[in-house]
Image (cartoon, rainbow, N blue to C red):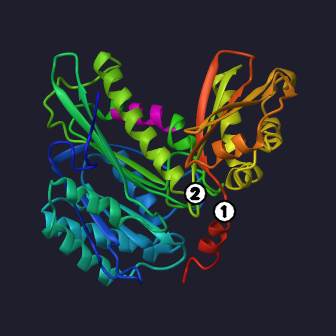
Amino acid sequence: MKKLEGGVTAPRGYRAAGCAAGIKKNGSMDMAMIASEVPCVLAGTFTMNVVKAAPVLWDRERVKEGSGRAVVVNAGVANACTGKEGMDYCAKTAEAASAALGISPQEVLLASTGVIGQQLPIDKILSGVRVLAGSLSDTIGAGNDAATAIMTTDTVAKETAVSLQFSDGSTAVIGGCTKGSGMIHPNMCTMLCFLTTDAAISKEMLQKALSAVVPDTFNMLTVDGDTSTNDTCLLMANGLAGNPPIEAESEDYRIFLKGLLEVCTTLAKRMAKDGEGATCLFECDVIHAASKEDAKRLARSVVSSTLTKAMIAGHDANFGRILCALGYSGVEFDPEEVSLRLESAKGSLLVYEKGVPLPFDEEYATAILSENEVRCIADMDCGSYDASAWGCDLTHAYVDINADYRS
């Protein structure tokens, strides 16, 4: 496996574009399109929020029913809680893309992000679709434009790609881009994620791979404890790599799964680091837990803790907050067996060992917690299972951003 430059246009046969359709008040790019030269096998995961946006309902049917060729995304308006009109606008958008690209409306997937409870400015959306269709390109820059255009409160575009070599020597690429900075506490995946691959793989195995990877990547990510109405993760496979089709849990499937895990882990960590108002990525690694599920629940509890997030923002090694978060996770463990370590590029510091607090240099601890990537390692010493979760610190800027988000 090898890291590549770019994102959704890195695999063979994909083009992308971004444009400013006038949806955002600041005039920045706010619409994106990703398209394949040939029909793609589809896989997807979606929000578990009972309140689901119109494009989520649209995409669930598309993924269930068949193949796809293109994704149209808008930022600025979520098209959530919009009733029949919102669904009608999904159909109109798909029809516009169909006409512009010469494909079926049923091959068009949709995604929206932004303010909930507002209707899409459909004239701007339809005009944007035509502009996007006319400017599609397979360049790295075009993929970056798409990743940039889907941003809302994100401060950086998030994309990555890897190259894989299968057992027969053939190669394939997996690329992806995400957006997500706030309202992130996924119960299936993330805010919006678009993954492309040129690997030849069956629909069943593609969905199996995505469903296997999401719980350990995007489901281990949190910024603020809010699960969005629009969470969507779409994976498209067009088969242009020409590898022997993956139709079972073979060695090639495991190679593909490893690549997909790498892409999704990278994107999840980048979203956590770019959380609204955040100054650092905060990772919790739980080791030696009694079960995999216990390890995951413990790690997520720590990165979700408001007090722990504030502690990281203040660069204060008040590790009792971490112990508290472990304790209310719902997992049974012996507190007298737990040890805690804080790490960053500045060093590593054991602050709590086997139920006993250790003396430590407060200035050194502050230096460790002042880096832009900080890790807590919680050793439960009661089993052989590990898990990692990713979050960020909580600063005053988070409130500033969300207090007047609509304006």
The disc at residue 279 is: 2
Camera-side residue of 236 and 90: 236
Task: Decide if residue 233 is in sight here.
Answer: yes
Q: Would you place residue 32 above or below residue 389 in this image?
A: below
Q: Which residue is mark 1?
A: 395
Q: Secondary structure at mark 2?
A: loop
N-term-proximal mark, 2 vs 1: 2
**Residue 94 quadrant:** bottom left
Q: Is residue 212 magenta?
A: yes
The disc at residue 355 is: none
The spot of residue 118 in percent (x, y) is: 50, 79
Magenta-drawn segment: 206-214
Q: Which residue is found at the position 68% from the left and 68% from the top?
A: 396
Q: Main secondary structure of the magenta part?
A: helix
The spot of residue 363 in percent (x, y) is: 73, 44
Q: Would you place residue 8 above or below residue 216 in this image?
A: below
